[in-house]
Amino acid sequence: MVSIKTRLDALHAAFTPGAPVADPGLFRGREELKADAETHLRNVGSHMLIYGEVGVGKTSLANSIRHLAKVLNPESILVDQVQCD
């Protein structure tokens, strides 16, 4: 029999609503924003800035864009992340 603590630990590991999505395969939605990001990544000299209210998914989107940049052209696309207070 599995203990309650073990079950709770598994639940907390699987369900993290307050943490950004690190695995781009798990990031869902924001299709229009991801398409815009891909357009910018394909245009030489283009820049992107992500901003918005706390908790709306900015970091998750940035993680998804970082993965896309590595897939499109890992040698010539620079992706940086800066947290502002």
Image (spheres, grey):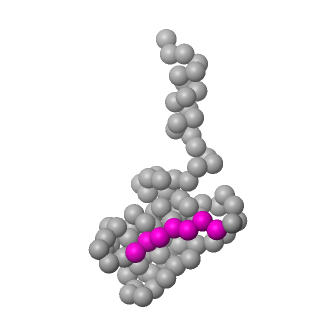
In terms of depth relative to the viewer, which is nearer, 14 or 79?
Answer: 79
Residue 82 quadrant:
bottom right
- View extreme (top): residue: 1
* Residue 27 left/right relative to 75: right
In terms of depth relative to the viewer, which is nearer, 36 or 53?
Answer: 53
- Give x and y (percent) for residue 33: 53, 72
- In this rendering, is residue 25 above or below 9? below
- Give x and y (percent) for residue 7: 54, 24
Magenta stretch, main secondary structure, is: loop
- Give x and y (percent) for residue 68: 39, 67
- Give x and y (percent) for residue 83: 60, 65
> Can residue 43 be seen by looking at this rendering?
yes
Residue 11 quadrant:
top right
- In this rendering, is residue 18 above or below 6? below
Q: Is residue 75 magenta?
A: no
Q: Residue at x 29, y 74 (%)?
A: 75
Q: Residue at x 37, y 76 (%)?
A: 77
> Can residue 35 be seen by looking at this rendering?
no
- Magenta stretch in the rendered image: 78-84
Name the quarter where the C terminus is drawn.
bottom right
Q: Residue at x 41, y 78 (%)?
A: 41
* Residue 50 left/right relative to 35: right
* Number of numbered labels in the structure image: 0
